[in-house]
Amino acid sequence: MAEPQTDVEPDTAGNSSASHSNAPQYHPSFSSPDADIVILSDDGVLFRVHKLVLQLGSGFFKTMLEMPRDAAEALNNEPILIQEKSNVFAILLDIIYPDRQPHDPQSLEFVQEILQAAEKFDMPKVSKTIRRLATPQSTFLTSAIDLYVLASQNGWEDVAKIASAETLKTNLYSSEYRDSLKRLDGNYLIRLVNLHRRRRRLFIDALDPNLDSEPKVVWRNVISSAESSPCHHFSRGFTLPWTNLKHFVSEALDVQPVGDAIRERSFIDNPALKTLWDYQCHLRDCVPRFHFLKEKLHPELIRILDLLPSTI
């Protein structure tokens, strides 16, 4: 077989890297003459690979290379044909070779191709490496929802939990995440949506004086009164200003379930809440009088926020 050219550049973005020449070309990182196995990728790139590395790093190739080979093929060292593109196979080899450092992949789609190939070739080290690289800071991910999708597709429950917490900074119902959410199976989608909804529901319930759920407002932390709770008129729903507060909390958690907006001083200083600070129960039989304290209510809201569930 004629000696191929060696001008193929490595690619980590998921694009084919072979030249348009009809002649096969060796991948520049895998063209060592002392390697004893030749592999030909789907896009026409050749790889010289050491048999021992393949056997140790891949259950698939271990089984294949232990089988007797056609004498003519063995004599000519005919390439082993694979269906994977050269950029995918190069990443696999970079990971299983002990002296190489793989380039960071640049897209979620490319990572999914790598994981599919790793499963096919039974390369556990590749799967473990990609799992280690999958973090909220990964350059190949555009959002925490993408990380959650990747974790769900591969059964990485610990990564899914980390990703679900990061998704609380986003609005799931934004159109920009629609396509990503479509890639989730039903169970993981329901769990994520429930986390976002549960945070809002539990916070609103905590502000309801008629519910004895956890977490809940510690009333003595937010009112000026010798009593440990507001008057009985308040619990009957006579305070429209408090209803307005619940509305603002619900709206903030709809937009961003992590609740960063609630932590800001500007939230409690919203002019629309002025009626809450001015409120007093004026019903004739109301004793004792009380009113809400802005400087105490805001820390109480943050305390409740910190008690809400943060992962699936």
Image: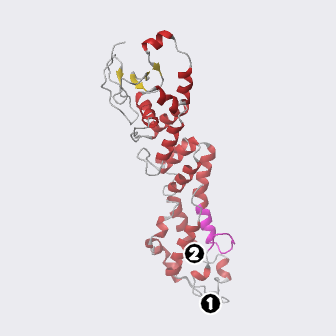
Label disc, if present, on residue 242 of the rendered structure: 2
Q: Nearer the viewer, residue 167 or 71?
A: 71
Does residue 93 appear in this view?
A: yes
Q: Which quarter of the rendered picture does the C terminus lie within?
A: bottom right
Q: Nearer the viewer, residue 8 or 273?
A: 8
277 to the left or right of 232: left
N-terminal of the two: label 1 or label 2?
1
Residue at (47, 9) in percent of width and height: 72
The type of colouring in the image is secondary structure
Does residue 179 appear in this view?
A: no
C-alpha separation, residue under disc 1 versus residue under disc 2: 20 Å
Residue 211 is covered by the magenta coloring: yes
Q: Residue beneath label 1, please?
A: 226
Residue sticking out furthest to the top:
72
Q: Crowding near pointer 1: few (<14 within 10 Å), some, many (20+)?
A: few
Q: Is residue 58 above or below residue 67?
A: below
Q: Nearer the viewer, residue 166 or 202?
A: 166
Q: Secondary structure at mark 1?
A: loop
Q: Which quarter of the rendered picture does the N terminus lie within?
A: top left
**Corner quadrant of residue 93:** top left
Q: Which one is in front in this view, the residue at disc 1 or the one at disc 2?
A: 1
Tell me residue 12's x, y (percent): 38, 36
**Corner quadrant of residue 5:** top left
Q: Is residue 264 above or below residue 187?
A: below
> What residue type is disc 2 on?
Trp
**Corner quadrant of residue 32:** top left
Which range is magenta? 199-216
Residue 25 is covered by the magenta coloring: no
Tell me residue 283's x, y (percent): 64, 86
> What residue type is disc 1 on?
Ala
